[in-house]
Amino acid sequence: MTHLRKTLPLALMLGGAALAQTEAPTLDTGDTAWMIVASALVLLMTPGLAFFYGGLSRTQSVLNTMMMSVVCIGLVGVLWLLGGYSIAFAPGGNAFFSGLSNFGFNGLAGQLTGTIPSYIFAAFQAMFAIIAVALISGAVIERMRFGAFVLFGGLWSLLIYAPLAHWVWNADGWLFKLGALDFAGGTVIHIAAGVSGLVAASVLGARIGFPKTAHVPHNVPFVLLGAGLLWFGWMGFNAGSALAANQTAALAFMTTLIAPAAAMLTWLGLESVRTGKPTAVGAATGLVVGLVAITPACAFVSPLASVLVGVLGAAASFAAVQLKTRMKADDALDVFACHGVAGIVGALLTGALAWTTGAGKPIGEQMVIQIIGVAAAIAWTGLGSFILLKLVGLVMPLRVPVSQEIAGIDVSAHSEQGYSDSETGLGAPVFVGGD
């Protein structure tokens, strides 16, 4: 026997209310097929992020940088089964978290979430949880111990991400009840990862030589490949959040095409004014920022309004990147500037522009709600990440030794290197001790 689960966090209709039915739903094979594809698209985003981040890193640390993303697939995938999903989405929870009644996906067999199998919904949500942790890694590359990142990432996924997802996307969550709009994760994923990355960078300290020594991308084609894979996968990320093959998914798909395009052009324009040259890294960064900004708004604003979301998101993140050297924290790959800032802008613009599709509450009321949601996410993830990092630091050192950081982490952490000496023209990194 199937039933409609109380929690339908992403299936938000344009009125901003949870999907409600009085009759038991039936499985829709078209919706199910779409959601299987959407889940696979979102999974592809994490290897895409690995290429994006890897290309931006130094040659000697490219594997370690990419592994920080790839390991999240295994780490968070298992933790999502054991407790993450249940904490976020199990029925019968309170305003802050659910219980563990769905531990090990208990109770999901044969059940439906809307018109799709609950197993598919859990898998789709797992992909979100995976990339949320992977995004943080960009702030701490080339200096954080791999083991420390894995321990921190696991704790963060269970204790920070899952409760925040419950707040925003579970019908019992306090931000959901308040009426906060976040269709596909601007608050839950991007603000959370951006703020946590900034905190982690501050706790670890700057890379050696920062900011006087330039840390330039070692492989720009990797960056472009990663950005392309992210955009491709993001279609499932946003449109899949409708949990059905319907008009809501179509709107989300369209705005996910338009906003990043506008953001990329904006970034290239600003870059050309500032330096005289548009760059490939700038194009990749701009489109990713546009994807971030439109994520919370993708099914709540019109395609025309999504242009404004992309333009303003890119402008705000571009400005934040220019201010990087004034900040105490060395956020290596600008995770806060690109994900945190664009996520904040996107969340606020969701409230300001939701009227273009008739979504949400009156604009003034909705803006207040969005500000509360943003502030709550910043406070929760910032303080929580600081505490977790300090706890991990009691178990093991957070940072690699200076000699390993200078030589590059790949060989010392993984006994591998990304390129042979003949390919790079560099001497082999020196192994200087264990992780």
Image (cartoon, rainbow, N blue to C red):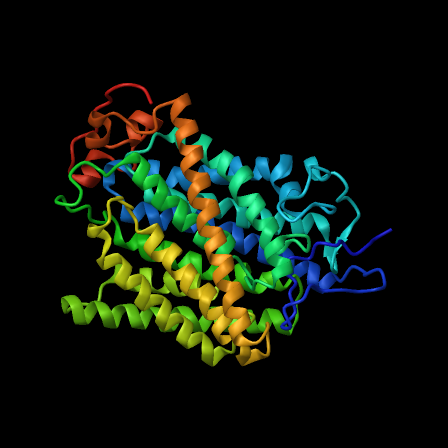
Q: Residue 253 at what x, y percent from top left?
A: 53, 69
Question: Looking at the image, is 22 positioned above or below residue 51?
Answer: below
Q: Quadrant of residue 6?
A: bottom right
Along the viewing direction, whichever of 131 and 90 lies nearer the viewer: 90
Along the viewing direction, whichever of 84 and 428 lies nearer the viewer: 84
Q: Along the horizontal axis of the image, is 44 left or right of 402?
A: right
Q: Along the horizontal axis of the image, is 116 left or right of 369?
A: right
Question: What residue appears at the point 28 percent right and 37 percent down from the top-left corner?
Answer: 142
Question: Looking at the image, is 314 positioned above or below residue 217?
Answer: below
Question: Looking at the image, is 163 positioned above or below residue 233?
Answer: above
Q: Along the horizontal axis of the image, is 197 left or right of 431?
A: right
Tally of marks: 0
Q: Residue 39 at what x, y percent from top left?
A: 59, 53
Q: Is residue 362 visible?
A: yes
Q: Residue 435 at what x, y percent from top left?
A: 33, 23
Question: What residue appears at the point 59 percent right and 56 percent down from the top-left corner?
Answer: 175
Along the viewing direction, whichever of 255 and 410 lies nearer the viewer: 255
Q: Residue 400 at what x, y percent from top left?
A: 29, 27
Question: What residue appears at the point 31 percent right and 41 percent down from the top-left corner?
Answer: 201
